[in-house]
Image: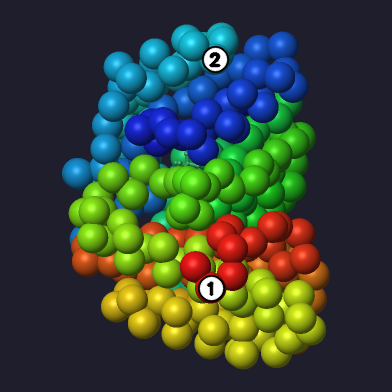
Amino acid sequence: MVPTMGALHAGHRALIERAVAENDRVVVTIFVNPAQFGPREDFARYPRTLDADLGLLGDVGVHAAFVPSVEAMYPPGLVTRLDISGPLGERLEGASRPGHFNGVALVVTKLLVAGLPDRAYFGQKDAQQCAVVRRLARDLDTGVEIVVCPTVRDTDGLAISSRNLYLSPEERMRALAIPSGLAEAMAQFDAGERDSSALATTVRSCLENKGLDVDYVAVVKADTFSEVETAAPTNQIVLAARIGNTRLIDVVRLGVDTAPVGRGV
Ligand code: PAF
C-alpha cells in the first residue's frame, strides 16, 4: 500500500515504483484527510488532481486505487480517536500543528485495516510522520512493514512537495535557502562540528537571510524525535519555514544522505 493525498508528483512516483518492484499487488490510496489539517490550514485549497493521478497509476502498473469519500472514512457518529503522545506527537510538527499526527495516525490506521497490506510505503521528507507511523504500526501490532523511501529533490535541491505548487517564481527561488542551508550544516557536520545548536544556527541564518519565517530547526533522533545536544550520524536535521503563505518542511540524515545541493549555492 502507498497511502497518499493525491496531487501525485515525482516523490510519490518513486514510492509507487518501488512498491510495484517489491510486491505482487500494489494499492495506492488517495484521500485528502480533513482530520490532519488544522482549522486555519490549507485543506480547502490543497491540490486535487484525480484524473492525472489515476493516469500516473495506470502508467506505473499499480493494481488498484482506493479513493474513499470523507463520509466513507469518517462515518457519522465516529467517536474513536488515536493519540500520539510524548515528544514524537507533540514536539516540532506536532507543536506547530496541534492534532496533526492524531489525524494522520487515525487515517493511516484505518487505511491499513482496510487494505491489510504486507508493506506500506512513505516518503522520508515527512520524517516525523514516518517515525509516528513506524511507532503506531508497532504499537498496534499491525504486522505491517513500514518502508521509508529517500526524499526526491528537484535538480536545484528543493524537496519535491505538493505544496511547492503554491510558490510564486520569486518564492520558489528564495525557497532554495532550505537545501543550501541544510547542505551547509551537513558540510559543517562532515568537518567535525557536533554541537547541534551550531548546526541549527547555520540553517536558521541561511533561511532568515532569504526572508523565510523559520518555524523550527532542530537536530533530533530519527525514531523518537527527541532533540540532541550532540549530533551523531543518523540524527536528522529537521526544519519548517514559511515563505509567504506556504509552509515547507525538509530533513537531512546526518552521515547518511548526500547534501541536497553543492556547498555555497
Ligand atoms: O503523507 C501524506 O500524504 C499523508 O499524511 C498520509 C500519510 C497519506 C495520511 O493522510
Label 1's element?
Answer: loop
Does label 1 point to a residue whose CB lies under 8 Å from ligand 1?
A: no
225 left or right of 105?
Answer: right
Judging by the rendered image, the residue that carries numbered circle 2 is 60
Which residue appears at 24% of the width and 54% of the height?
169
Amino acid identity at mark 1: Gly
236 left or right of 248?
Answer: right
**Residue 220, percent from left and from top:** 66, 73
Judging by the rendered image, the residue that carries numbered circle 1 is 264
Which residue appears at 49% of the width and 68% of the height?
265
Amino acid identity at mark 2: Val
Which residue appears at 76% of the width and 75% of the height?
190
224 left or right of 122?
Answer: right
**Residue 47, percent from left and from top:** 27, 38
Q: Nearer the viewer, residue 195 or 87?
A: 195
**Residue 149, percent from left and from top:** 65, 42
CB atoms of marks 1 and 2 within 8 Å = no
Residue 86: image quadrant is bottom right
Q: Nearer the viewer, residue 258 or 238?
A: 258
Which residue appears at 76% of the width and 59% of the height?
256
Does label 2 point to a residue whose CB lies under 8 Å from ligand 1?
A: no
Instruction: Identify the image's colour scheme: rainbow, by chain, secondary structure or one colour.
Output: rainbow
| Res. 49 in view | yes
